[in-house]
Amino acid sequence: MSLPRALLLDMDGVLYRGSSPIEGAAEFLHAISDCPFRFITNNPIATPEQVVSKMKAMGLGDFAAETVITSAQATARYLASEKADFRFYAIGASGLSKALSQVGHQDDQAADYVVVGEGEGLDYQTLSKAIALIQQGAVLISTNPDITVDGFVDGKPVVLPGGGALVAPMEKACGVKAITIGKPEPLLYEMALADLAVEAGDCVMVGDRPDTDILGAQSLGLQTALVRTGRFAPDAEWPVDQVAPTWDVSDLSQLLAAWT
Ligand SMILES: [Mg+2]
């Protein structure tokens, strides 16, 4: 075995949990440094610059912001391809508005798109505004489908609402289904593959979630590696209705051992 031609790496649950690096992640990243790769994350909250500086602070390495594609950036690129100079109303943490503002314009009176991300921002007022805009014809967009995400409050692990949960009130109130951008939808993977100029079959997706990371990669024809350091526990049974990943390993050091 040798290293894959190219790699897509999920971050949370693969490289770190909260602000702690996962054991073996730094060594893994060092070992694959000659391999073309992108970090792809459904988390729209942090900007790529914030993500790489967090990784540096954790001792995971010094990476260019261009190596990170978040669901907020994928959303921005998607909307720009749908409509040049689009107008948007965003609900969620600031990483989302920052990404959207690079290609579109904030406009809470006549938005083309209501875009829902993760983090703070959803309340009675913003929800009412979003409903009014959707009734005027704005298209509802969700950065990522995760119902819940793992987070930390005061250093303690907690379950937080994900993009899929935050967009649900608008879907319910307006009787519409949001267009969803993050994994397992194809867009984030397709952008990363295009950036790397590689074919899906030459690339391995490494992730911790069967239902997002692995499922989306499988449907595009990527090879897949599941690491059981995140959402999916070491003793969890692989879902019977899903094809097994190419590699199913306890952690990144075991994956590296399988490749070298
Ligand atoms: Mg993950």
Image (cartoon, rainbow, N blue to C red):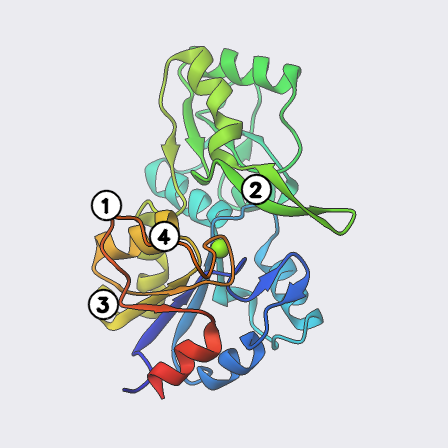
- Residue 235 or residue 138, whichever sits in front: 235
The response on whether ligand 1 sits within 8 Å of label 4 is no
Crowd tier of the residue under label 1, counting other residues whose Cα lies within 10 Å: few below 14, some 14–19, many 20 or above = few
Q: Identify the mark at residue 241; answer none if there is no mark.
A: 1
The response on whether ligand 1 sits within 8 Å of label 1 is no
Tell me: residue 162, above or below residue 51: above
CA separation, marks 4 and 2?
25 Å
Horizontal and vertical percent position of residue 121: 65, 29
- The quadrant of the picture occupied by the N terminus is bottom left
The answer to whether residue 115 is left or right of residue 36 is right
CA separation, marks 3 and 4?
22 Å
| Residue name at image x 53 percent, y 28 percent | 166
Front label number (3 vs 4): 4
Q: Identify the mark at residue 210; answer none if there is no mark.
A: 4
Given the image, on which type of amino acid does mark 2 rest?
Leu
Given the image, on which type of amino acid does mark 1 rest?
Asp
Given the image, on which type of amino acid does mark 4 rest?
Pro
Front label number (1 vs 4): 1
Name the image quarter holding residue 225.
bottom left
- The quadrant of the picture occupied by the C terminus is bottom left
Crowd tier of the residue under label 2, counting other residues whose Cα lies within 10 Å: few below 14, some 14–19, many 20 or above = many
The residue at which mark 2 appears reads as 96
